[in-house]
Structures are given as C-alpha cells and as structure tokens.
Image: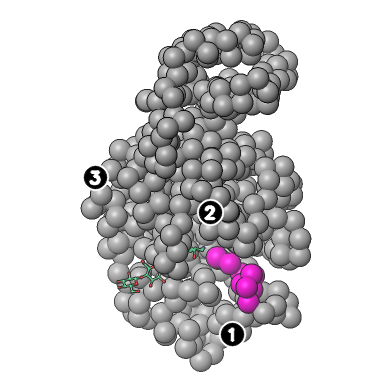
Amino acid sequence: MHRLVIVLLGSAALPDCSQAAGAPASRCAVRQVNAIARACGPLLRAEARRLSDGNTVRRDARVARVLSRLSHARDAPQAADMLFRLAGIAIGDATTRGLRALGEEAGLLIGTAVEPHDVASDPNYPPVLASDVASLTAENAMKWAPVHPDPGTYDFAAADAVVALAESGSHRLRGHTLVWGGAALPPYVEGAATGDELRSYLADHIATTMGRWAGRIAQWDVVNEPLSGILDPPTPDGLDDNVFRRLLGPGYVAEALELARAADPTAKLYVNENGIEVPGPRQDRFFALVQELLAAGAPLDGVGFQAHLGLIPIGQYPDAATIEASLRRFAELGLEVELTELDVTLLFRSGDLPSRLEFQGDYYRGVLEACTRVPACTGVTLWGLADRYTWVRRSFGFTDFPLPFDDDWRRKPAYFGMRAALAAAALRNA
Ligand code: G3I
C-alpha cells in the first residue's frame, strides 16, 4: 500500500518548504501535511476501514505494519514522515479534531497546567483549551501558600477560578498539590516548632482545601516530590529533608494520604515525582516508597510521573520503550499512572532551532506512544501549552521551547507528534 501512496504523494503538488526557515518552516510543513491529507486522507481512511474489518489482534498487527512501513520508508523519507503524521490526521481531520477528541479515542486525557490570569488575558487560550485539552491542573493556584497563607486564613479566589474554568469547559480536574516540602509553603508551616503543631496545620489544610471542592476534583497530587531533590545531596533515607519529614518522620506521606481519603473519598490520590521516568536508583527508591505505602495499607491510587524530560535528569531523553517500561513497572502494582507535568526542554540539544523542533516532534510522539501502550496510563498533562508560558522561562529565565505550541500559538512539530501517537492508538482501539 505504501508504494502507491508515496507515488500519490509525488503528485500531491506539495508546497516546497526548502526555502522557508525558522517558524514559517513549521507553517509550511503544516500546509504540506494538509496537502497530503487532501490527497491521501480518503485513501488512508479506506485503508484503516479495510484493516479494521478483522479481529482486534489481526487489525493491530496489520495496522502496526502499515504505520511502521510508512515511518521507515527509505525512498521518500520526508514524505514518509509526513505520511506518518498523516496517518494521525487521516483519523482526525487536520482542521477540526484536536488532541482532546483523539486522546479520548486513544483512551487517555490530554491536560495542561494553567494560570487563571494567563487564560483570562490571552484570547488564543480558550479555543485551544476547548479543542486540545480534556484536563486542567492549577500550575500554582492550589498550592499551600496561595490558598492558606496564615493558620486561620484561606484564599481560594485563584483556585476557584481554575475550578470554574474547568467546569465551564467540561474538563477533568487534577488538584496540585496539598503537601510539598520543597516550595510554596508559607513561613508558619516552614517554621512549625513541633510535630503536633505541624500535624494540626496539615489536618486543617487537607480537610479544608479538599473539602472545598469535594466530588469535583478527580485526582489530587496529595504529596509532591517526597524524594530528595535530584540535584540535592543525597539524604540517608532518600527522602527530601523537609519540615514534614523532620517533624513527622517518613510516615508523613501515609498520614497525608489518610487525611486526603477522609477529606474527599471520591478523589483518586496520587504521589507525584520527577526524574522517575528513567530506570536507576531514583526510580528504585520511589518504587520502594510506593511499595511501603501499599504494604501499610495507605490509600494510594496512582503515581504521577512529572516528565520534565531532558531537564530532570539534566540532558536525558529516555526513549519510548524506556518510558513505557517505567510506567508498566508501577502500573503492575495495581496503580494508575499519569504523566503529570510533561514538557521537553531543548536546552541540552545542539543544532539549529528547526532541527531541534523536529527532534522534539518525534520525541513527543514517542512519549505519547509510551502512555498509549500502558492501559493504566490514563492521562498526559502538559506543563503548559504555549512556549511563552513555560515555567522554564519564568523560573530560570532560559530561552526554551518545551511545549507543543510556539509563542504565537502555532502548532509545532511536537503537536503533530502527539497527534500521530494518539491517532495510531485510536486506530488500534478502533
Ligand atoms: O504570584 C507571585 C507574584 O505575585 C510575585 O510578584 C512573584 C515574585 O517572584 O512570584 C509569583 O509567584 C511565583 C509563582 O510561580 C507564580 O508565578 C513564585 O515566586 C514561583 O516560585 C512559582 O514557581 C512555580 C514553582 O512550581 C514553585 O511553586 C512555577 O510557576 C511552577 O511551574 C512550578 O511547578 C512545579 C510543580 O508545581 C511541581 N513539579 C515541579 C514544577 C516545576 O518546578
């Protein structure tokens, strides 16, 4: 089949992108892909229908062969690469079906972190939230310091805005995060003098914060980053040396989970960590913590893989098979797994920007592919949508381009890479 389609490609009068440079190149590539979609979409749809007349196993194997041939064709590499993306677009129309619909057909929710003031002030945001997002996380608004700045004071205004935004767009909500010893803690918590004092703050914080939206937030990152920071000196037990660990002992993670279950029994309870996508001592330590929690009967439902890829650990881009194996390792404990803060930094990639963006596109495709192949992987949340809002720029001042939309909200190769993976999974699930 693919020879025929490649020939057809040759006659598809593709726009010539060889002269374009930088951002227009991706716009030109999108024109190319749409030209291919017009020329070949019906053919690929017919192929998908033909392949889908068999049973699931036969269909999967044959579909996988077709897509594999397309993505490894030697005679027209660029066309073949475009065609692989087309395989995704042929399932979901290039202009109307976004990542939200494709993700749901692939069996997972695509999400993003948001700051409410960004959404309110940028007219480009709402349409993308509607077409490409099924789940929202408050990037900062639900953290301890913003919502509970003093022992007797709660300020839910910004957090309520995120909840309202999610509910108005029928988005699932992830609560982030109730207990994080590493940041966003007010001085009265950091400065607690005794375990009893801290325990009273913790119980009040979890009961009040979760209670405010009980039944409306699907998942909570109850504890964020319980391991010692990946760049910090190692601690004797591998746990982060924070006020909770110091005053309440290592059992604070289980304590927080128990308080959370009592506060909202409808919510799935997660522990969220970075740098666990790659096998090694850090993933092993986190796995041991999760096993200890489950053995102690702690109410743990899921594990969040933050997936700040290329950054934590620095310069490491674990491939799709590695990420899939890491997800499976925790899923086999009976847990849900989600990618909860996905971004792919280009800070540690050499080459000109167009070539790094092409790498990023293929890499995003592999990361999404990994999640689609693990049934317990129920969601992929991006840590932002457009590069202009990435925390990497805001927190470190670096010029980075880690997200699927560029500064002007144009869809980057990363967007099409995500789409191709979701479409291939949707085809498998069809
Ligand atoms: O809102 C205040 C503003 O009023 C003030 O003028 C300004 C002065 O610096 O600070 C603003 O708050 C900042 C906040 O982001 C909102 O922009 C905080 O200083 C800053 O520390 C905070 O950084 C956030 C960081 O978590 C710490 O909470 C990042 O935006 C956020 O992307 C980052 O996200 C974390 C996840 O929650 C957990 N996993 C790692 C991830 C990246 O660090």
- First-in-chain label (2 vs 3): 3
C-alpha separation, residue under disc 1 versus residue under disc 3: 46 Å
The disc label shown at residue 346, or none: 2
User: Please, what secondary structure does the residue beneath circle 3 have?
Assistant: loop
| Quadrant of the rendering where the C terminus is positioned | top right
Closest to the camera, between mark 2 and mark 1, is 2
Which residue is label 3 attached to?
123
The disc label shown at residue 247, or none: 1
| Quadrant of the rendering where the N terminus is positioned | top right
Q: Disc 3 beta carbon < 8 A from ligand 1?
A: no
Residue positioned 67% across, 50% down in the render: 318
Amino acid type shown at disc 2: Leu
User: Please, what secondary structure does the residue beneath circle 1 have?
Assistant: helix
Residue 108 coordinates in the image, percent (x, y): 54, 37
- First-in-chain label (1 vs 3): 3
Write the start and end of the magenta stretch as one range. 224-232
C-alpha separation, residue under disc 2 versus residue under disc 1: 39 Å
Amino acid type shown at disc 3: Pro
As rendered, which of 346 and 102 lies closer to the eye?
346
Residue 26 visible somewhere in the drawing: yes
Horizontally, residue 253 falls left or right of residue 189, namely right
Amino acid type shown at disc 1: Leu
Residue 92 coordinates in the image, percent (x, y): 46, 23
As rendered, which of 171 and 184 lies closer to the eye?
184
Residue 163 coordinates in the image, percent (x, y): 34, 52
